[in-house]
């Protein structure tokens, strides 16, 4: 009986490491009421040079999320203000993949902070994404992908769905496996 419990615990911990620990949440968001999702949307993403790869991951996840619900998304180049949805990456910290893999439990965590302004459809706020683990430390762009999906779901539904952060303990790592 004890051996079976130890085996399941090992599977849960290994699963948490392999699945990855990333997500996104709104730090602040305002959504106009009543809300009407757009049928089409032009998007500009402004990012510092060091965040270009993260910018592409964010764009890809956002466009995929919107298209999955029938919303046509067009990315336009330029500075903030030229599109219906303006996203600005104000912070990009890829963290350390090696530290996430070797140490885990929050060491080497990466994060992204994106300011969102969609004045024409009525959503404004700041989204925060993170990566704190995964297969061989996870991909730093997972935080950007999670943030792009969060922003996309909010544009689709007009609701601020959030994946609340959990404390970084071995127990929370195991509990995330069942939740994902």
Image (spheres, grey):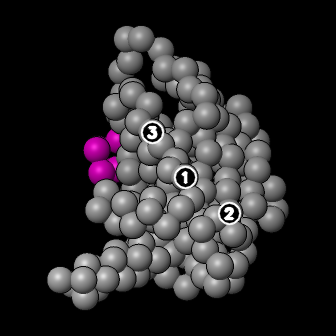
Q: Is residue 132 left or right of residue 176?
A: right
- Tell me whether the residue at label 3 lies in contact with that at label 1, contact meaning CB atoms closer than 8 angstroms: no
Q: Which residue is mark 2?
A: 110
Residue 167: image tag = 1
Q: Which residue is mark 3?
A: 162
User: Is label 3 or label 1 in front?
Assistant: 1
User: Is residue 173 found inside the magenta-colored segment of the image?
Assistant: no
Q: Is residue 116 visible?
A: no
* Mark found first going from the N terminus, 2 or 1: 2
Please determine whether, in this image, residue 136 is positioned above or below residue 56.
Answer: below
* Stretch in magenta: 67-72
Tell me the SS state at disc 3.
Answer: loop
Tell me the SS state at disc 2.
Answer: strand
* Mark found first going from the N terminus, 3 or 1: 3
Judge by depth and name the residue closer to the eye, 82 or 152: 152
Picture coordinates of residue 87, whole percent (x, y): 64, 41
Q: Residue at x 76, y 50 (%)?
A: 91
- Tell me whether the residue at label 2 lies in contact with that at label 3, contact meaning CB atoms closer than 8 angstroms: no
Q: Residue at x 36, y 21 (%)?
A: 36
Judge by depth and name the residue closer to the eye, 87 or 75: 87
């Amino acid at each position: 009986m004890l051996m079976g419990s130890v085996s399941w615990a090992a599977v849960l911990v290994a699963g948490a490491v392999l699945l990855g620990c990333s997500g996104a949440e709104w730090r602040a968001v305002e959504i106009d009421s009543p809300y009407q999702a757009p049928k089409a949307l032009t998007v500009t993403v402004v990012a510092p040079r060091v965040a270009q790869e993260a910018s592409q991951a964010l764009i890809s996840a956002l466009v995929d999320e919107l298209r999955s619900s029938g919303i046509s998304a067009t990315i336009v180049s330029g500075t903030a203000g030229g599109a219906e949805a303006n996203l600005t990456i104000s912070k990009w910290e890829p963290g350390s993949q090696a530290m996430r893999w070797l140490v885990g439990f929050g060491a080497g965590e990466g994060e992204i902070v994106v300011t969102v302004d969609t004045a024409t459809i009525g959503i404004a706020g700041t989204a925060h994404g993170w990566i704190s683990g995964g297969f061989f430390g996870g991909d730093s762009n997972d935080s950007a992908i999670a943030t792009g999906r969060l922003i996309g779901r909010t544009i689709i539904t007009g609701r601020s769905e959030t994946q609340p952060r959990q404390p970084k303990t071995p127990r929370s790592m195991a509990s995330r496996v069942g939740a994902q």
